[in-house]
Amino acid sequence: MARRGIWLIVLIYALLSPLAAQASSDGDCKPSWTIFGTGASNCSNLAVLQPANDTRANLLLLLADQDGTPPTPVRTDEKGASAALAAPSDWAAFLGALYPSPSTGGDGLYASGEGSRCRSNKSGEADFVAALKADQSVTPGERDELIAARQALQPDCTGAGAGQQAVSAAAEHAQSPLAKAFAAYLQGAASFYAGDFGTAAQHFATLNGSAQPWLRESGLYLLGRVEVNQLQAGAFDKYGNLKDVPERDVGKATEAEKALQDYLAAYPDGRYAASARGLLRRVYWLSGNNAKLLADYERLLGQKASERGISAADLAQELDIKLLPLLGSEQVRSPLLLATLDLVRMRKGGFLGGGTCCSKIPTLAELKGQSEIFAGHADLFDYLLASYQFHVARQPRAVLDLIADRARQKSYTNLEFSRQVLRGLALDAVNDRNARGFWLDLIEGANPASQRFVVELALALHDERVRTPERVFDPASPVRNEAIRRTLLKYSAGPQLLRRVAGDAAAPEAERATAVYALLYRDLTRGAYKAFPDDLALAPADAKTEAKSTDAESNDKLSSEVFVKPETASDFSCPDLKSSVATLAANPRDIGGRLCLGEFIRLNWLDQSFLDIPPSKEELGGKGVLFPGRQFSRLEAYRSIMDAAAATSDQKAYALYRAIRCFAPSRNNGCDGSVVPVADRKAWFQRLKRDYPQSNWAQSLDYYW
């Protein structure tokens, strides 16, 4: 059982290794709705080259350009427009949306390395059956028994597995020379999957002189796999982590490399050539031979897609896991790989820790010194220099000198699109009056499967920055992404825009619901009490509550029922919400009205609502809300009421009680997040007990937190 657990860990190691996490920033995170961010993130990938992208995403975009592979739309919206990438995405979503393809590291070619040897069982069975059926030198009886034995072989790589007896019986019954050769292969396969590599090698070696072409080739190939498995058997600790190089038996790497090279020398274009080359890279990785590993990756990066024997996605994944964090820029000669390293080094605090690669931000002189490597890739080189000026030097005007305006094209490569997006960001950064027009020009040729979302986000960011988010909602606006539009309604929109969208019968239901909810919430928390009755009429009478969470991500379908039919089970006597708001409309400082508004907010989970916890300033929604008025605070209201001369004894007692309860039970302020010294809370508690001892609130309170 222990061995089985170890091999399972080995199989998934490529996805969980520390190196992969360092290179790609894998791990849970919240998407960042911005463009050209410099913070490391695993879930904010865009179809544009940028420091914040997962390194695999950047490399894949460059490879796609080199291979002439446009993004593949995988779905369309109700209008038939592609919506493949409609949000900042993690690596899996990014890959699945734009470049979906079968992995070459699956049950067939093992291009990313051996992993679990048992994954080849099905493909090995198919090859065996096909070769046996194609050869007429085996009697029908022998053929049927050999095929049945191979199909019965169901290994699990724990040292056991179904089908061993059938293999032994088939070998014993084989009479013709060729049937005995196929039986020897079967015996070798059974031993190989059982982990008896010495016996497996003996059987496979007997096939070297076979007259049957497939047996001869597969036997030589499998001798290489045997050596790889013996090498990797001692390369991992009991937890599945790769041991330090001195602790590995790297001497076995010589035998493994020779065996695989022997196969490739005999069959350079053979059935298993791509797999053998992938296994060679695994040998280099396991033995710490980074120089050979880098040379092979750079060879692959320079090849045509049809020649690699590994998909661009698998190549990006494999390189990212096995080598990228260990590279220094001075070692790299591939323009694509060097560009990937340069971009990640421009991250803000997002270097690939624990490795050679990215321990410091590049200097402009260092980047210019790479010009020889980028010979023939002038656009990529200029883009890297411009990226440095924008992200590191903070000189957006220098970007405009490096990247010419080419925003009116019918289509863009990933690199040219990235260049134009960077120019657009520079125009925004210098407050160029033509910045918005540039984005409108760029969107016309943007690939709807990948690039259009980036430009829509850029337009929304621009309009929010110049405080005109309403332009996103104009009938002719090209910004159709629902998440972008709803983000502006939640965090940026003023009352006029919210009312316009809330009353637009042609607007999407979720968009209208968001506008109504945000409008009513801000009416109550920003003092727009006189507008509340008319705005409440915009809410559907049959609104259903979808969520009462303070987490914005949980409120995909915001319901205004909380305002139409609020929770009212309070221990302080209040009229209905409409009456309380009418009282405040007549006198915003009315004590009873403020206490009852506080009760509405408390009972309906609206303290510190997500609407008042906007994204960071760099992200969409982070520029500040345009709704006038100061945010209502329950605690602030309680503190003013407890000292108000006009307040009744009950009102003061309840204000003291609720002010103290703001900190229950965690001692954190759940009312408005402000910090209040414990001494102040103790003083409120003592005052409540001393001045209002007969009140239910004084008698029920035992702590002040």
Image (spheres, rainbow, N blue to C red):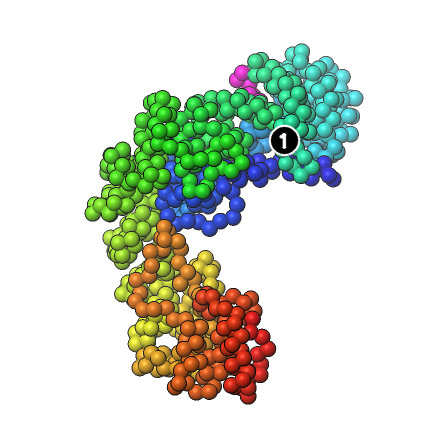
User: Looking at the picture, how far across and down is residue 302, in whole percent?
Assistant: 43, 23
Q: How many marks?
A: 1
- Whether residue 299 is visible, yes or no, is yes
Residue that numbered label 1 is attached to: 244
User: Looking at the picture, how far across and down is residue 11, in whole percent?
Assistant: 62, 36
Nearest the viewer among 419 and 142 is 419
Nearest the viewer among 154 and 604 is 604
Q: Is residue 476 left or right of residue 559?
A: left
Is 275 in the magenta? yes
Quadrant for residue 564, please give it: bottom left
Dot 1 amino acid type:
Asp
The boundaries of the magenta stretch are 268-276
Quadrant for residue 345, please give it: top left
Q: Is residue 75 left or right of residue 161?
A: left
Q: Residue at x 63, y 21 (%)?
A: 253
Q: Is residue 417 left or right of residue 167?
A: left
Nearest the viewer among 332 and 147 is 332
User: Looking at the picture, how far across and down is residue 590, in whole percent?
Assistant: 36, 82
Q: Residue at x 73, y 22 (%)?
A: 198
Name the image quarter holding the C terminus: bottom right
Q: Is residue 129 left or right of residue 587?
A: right
Characterize the local packing of mark 1: few (<14), some (14-19) or many (20 or more) Cα atoms within 10 angstroms: few
Q: Secondary structure at mark 1?
A: loop
Name the image quarter holding the N terminus: top right
Q: Residue furthest left?
A: 433
Is 495 in the magenta? no
Q: Residue at x 38, y 23 (%)?
A: 373
Relative to 273, say whether 427 is above or below: below
- Whether residue 456 is visible, yes or no, is no
Q: Residue at x 61, y 25 (%)?
A: 287
Quadrant for residue 403, please give it: top left
